Amino acid sequence: MPSQLKNPRDFATATPFLLAVLVLAAAARTGGAPCDKSDMAALLAVKSALGNPPALSGWNSTVDCCSWPYGISCDANSGRVTDLTVFGREISAPIPAAIANLTALRSINFAYNQLHGSIPAFLGPHELPDLTFLRLDGNRLTGPIPPTATVFNLLLVGNQLTGEIPDTFADAVFGDVELSDNQLTGDASMLFGAKKQLNALFLSRNRFRFDLGRVELPEAMDILEIDGNMVYGSIPAEAAARKWLSFNVSYNQLCGPIPQGKYTHRFGPKHFAGNKCLCGRPLAPCT
């Protein structure tokens, strides 16, 4: 299982949103509306389904859930639970079904536990309409990604997920998709597109196979990590003009010249190594 510090995103670019979520979730709220009663019942059911772990001992029915010391943030006006965090607690359980009753959730962070079983279909905007951040990386989840998981920030790194990317992802609006270190297969090219909002894509160390030379890089994209797959074709020429924060296409089946630009020059041979016939700086010259 990958450690938290091995998340492939650089801390300077990876953590601002996550840290904001954690801070909000950890802070005890003062004032505002009391916790919604149905949300409190759902949270207690979540705690029970997780095996009543010591880390959640502060989740107590005698205390307003918006004031619980860990894991919860609420909307001050409605008292609805908006953020749910159970991070790095080594909890072994399936994802609790009672989360589906927390219909005002904006973010869920269950990273770095030992959650097992499949990802439930309710973890998406169809049943949780305000959900924009879903982090389940570093668990033991299996099976396919459900077609309903079209969440703007989707982080599933380091599980045991299988199958292909759902067709629904082609028309979904994503900002950050992190699927590295799973056993996923098939065509991931539907995630690309010049007009898409996607700025970070992590597909490393799966079994994806598609023609990179035929995709259009999203205009906002500044992180592309697709190393360790079976991606073929060439690197798109527009890669030369991008202000890449991270770029790795190593250990695929790519060919042709590496686009030369100020920001592609920041990356050394290891970011391009192990391909079929890539050439040009920082690899050997093209002949």
Image (cartoon, rainbow, N blue to C red):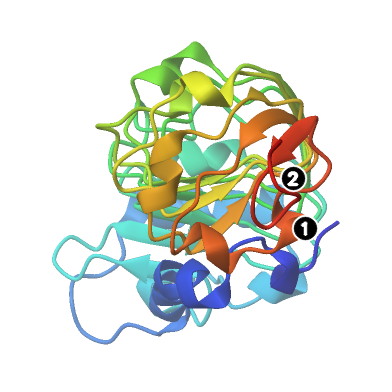
Measure the alpha-carbon separation of dots 2 and 1. Answer: 7 Å
How crowded pointer 1 is (Cα within 10 Å; few <14, some 14-19, many 20+) is rated as few
The amino acid type, in three-letter code, at marker 1 is: Lys
The amino acid type, in three-letter code, at marker 2 is: Ser
**Disc 1 marks which residue?**
270
237 over 11 or under it: above or below: above
Tell me: 178 left or right of 33: right
Q: Would you identify the image quadrant in which residue 269 lies?
A: bottom right
Identify the mark nearer the N-term, 2 or 1. 2
Which mark is drawn over residue 250? 2
Q: Would you identify the image quadrant in which residue 4 lies?
A: bottom right
Tell me: 213 left or right of 184: left
Q: Are marks 2 and 1 in contact (CB under 8 Å)?
A: yes
Closer to us: 286 or 51: 286
Residue 88, given in percent of the width and then of the height, sits at: 72, 69
Q: Residue at x 31, y 48 (%)?
A: 220
Tell me: 125 left or right of 268: left
Q: Residue at x 68, y 48 (%)?
A: 157
